[in-house]
Image (tube, helix red, strand yellow):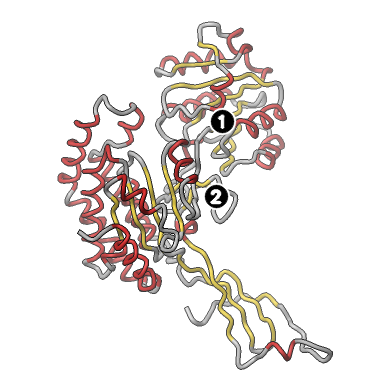
Amino acid sequence: MTGITDQIKKAKSATVSMSVLPTGVKNDALSNMADALDSKRGYVIGENRKDLEDAEGKIPGPMYKRMMVDDAKVDEMVRGIRSVMSLEDPVGGTMSATELDDGLMLYQVRCPVGMLGVVFESRPDVVPQIMSLCLKSGNCVAFKGGSEAHRTIKAIFGVLRDAASSAGIPESAFVLLESRDDFKEILDLDEYIDLLIPRGSNSFVRYVQDNTRIPVLGHAAGICHVYIDSECDQDMALSVAMDSKIQYPAVCNAVENILVDSAIAEEFLPRLISSMKENGVEVRGDVRTKAIVPDINAASEEDWFEEYDDLIIAIKVVDSLEDAIDFINSHSSHHTEAIITNNMQKAAVFTKMVDSADVFVNASTRFADGYRFGKGAEVGISTNKIHARGPMGMEGLMIYKYVLIGNGQVVKDYVGKDARQFKHIRKDAECPLR
């Protein structure tokens, strides 16, 4: 079998042809991928059962849950691929047009990043999400999934790549890394890989960031907060807080810390904690929370920085909106935060002053997701402050180039005593060379 470096080189070479694929070819490939995954679900689920049998009792519970694939999960994958089909093709779109001078037009045009490396742990559904987004955006991609789900990942990857190639997509555009050595090898391939996107635990992402020269885009942790303001609908607050924790606790957009305003703490905390316990959540509270509801575990300082990915919640009483904002900005991983309030002035302050990729008002943190944001699927969630932030759809896979169209202009005419003057007029115009 061809070595990984050679496969990456071939994929890098395919970036040129991928970047100019017609939209119809891309959509045909996506349709084939959705149909193939739907029809071969039995094979995929069967391979997943083998992985689950091997992993049972050997990996953490949240990781085990994330790697499970059943009919509902396959349905979700298929829907995600089809939703990407419906999205506008971003390649070649004009971001801005500027008339520099008569007959001299400058266009800022979207183009693919090129060759991506996506490294993830235990979620096989990452493969269809990212392959479909990369295909529609004209990017090539190499995948490395967790060894605990290697059969499932290989099955899904093979089904999707074969289906895409049957519609004219270069087979070399998609690469599957199957060993830890493969993964370590690609970290040195900064000449060929344009961007690495790691998805996984804090320590895993940090490892990738510390061991490569390739630009890394992603988030190292998902420490999310919900602040329950004194001026809230308490029934709404309870509903949103519970959904943020228990709807799917093993993911990065589940809430880990809940802050409750002291003005309503005595009334609201017993309801919140009771509901959490009824749903199997271990509650850890600060001194003021324990004073109101003694029958909970004490929260340590480390708890406020912990991403549990499990049915555990830390609760703290604060005295004001300002205290909540200060606490969030100093303890959050800058992923997703929410405020529950009927006071829109407070909501405005919260959304402006909380320094996170996603800031919600009266809504569950679990909405921080590319599919729910209407992006078709999700490449990952970035807490970076460059290039892309928050749930990343195709826009996170795009960059741009400048296209200048003239009719013989030369710079010397714009320099010196009698130089021509630039107009620099912004125009509402599409690049004619798309």
Q: From the image, tell me which residue sits under label 1.
A: 225
Instruction: Please give the name of the residue rendered at 37% of the width and 48% of the height, measured from the top-left corner.
Output: 184
Q: Position of residue 395 (x, y in %)?
A: 49, 58
Q: From the image, tell me which residue sits under label 2.
A: 389
Crowd around label 1: few <14 · some 14–19 · many ≥20 (10 Å): many
Instruction: Please give the name of the residue rendered at 48% of the width and 72% of the height, measured from the top-left corner.
Output: 92
Figure quadrant of residue 342:
top right
90 to the left or right of 46 = right
Q: Position of residue 246 (x, y in %)?
A: 42, 27
224 to the left or right of 160 = right
Q: Position of residue 268 (x, y in %)?
A: 58, 16
Instruction: Please give the name of the residue rendered at 46% of the width and 17% of the height, measured from the top-left corner.
Output: 275
Above or below for 117 versus 301: below
Q: Please tell me the numbered disc located at residue 122.
A: none
121 or 104: nearer the viewer = 121
- Kindly identify the amino acid type of the residue bearing the numbered disc 2: Arg
Q: CA distance from mark 1 to mark 2?
A: 18 Å
- Kindly identify the amino acid type of the residue bearing the numbered disc 1: His
Figure quadrant of residue 20:
bottom left
Figure quadrant of residue 36:
bottom left
Q: Secondary structure at mark 1?
A: strand
412 or 372: nearer the viewer = 412
326 to the left or right of 176 = right
Q: Position of residue 120 (x, y in %)?
A: 37, 44
Q: Please say if the residues under marks 1 and 2 sit with CB atoms less than 8 Å apart.
A: no
412 to the left or right of 132 = right
Crowd around label 2: few <14 · some 14–19 · many ≥20 (10 Å): many
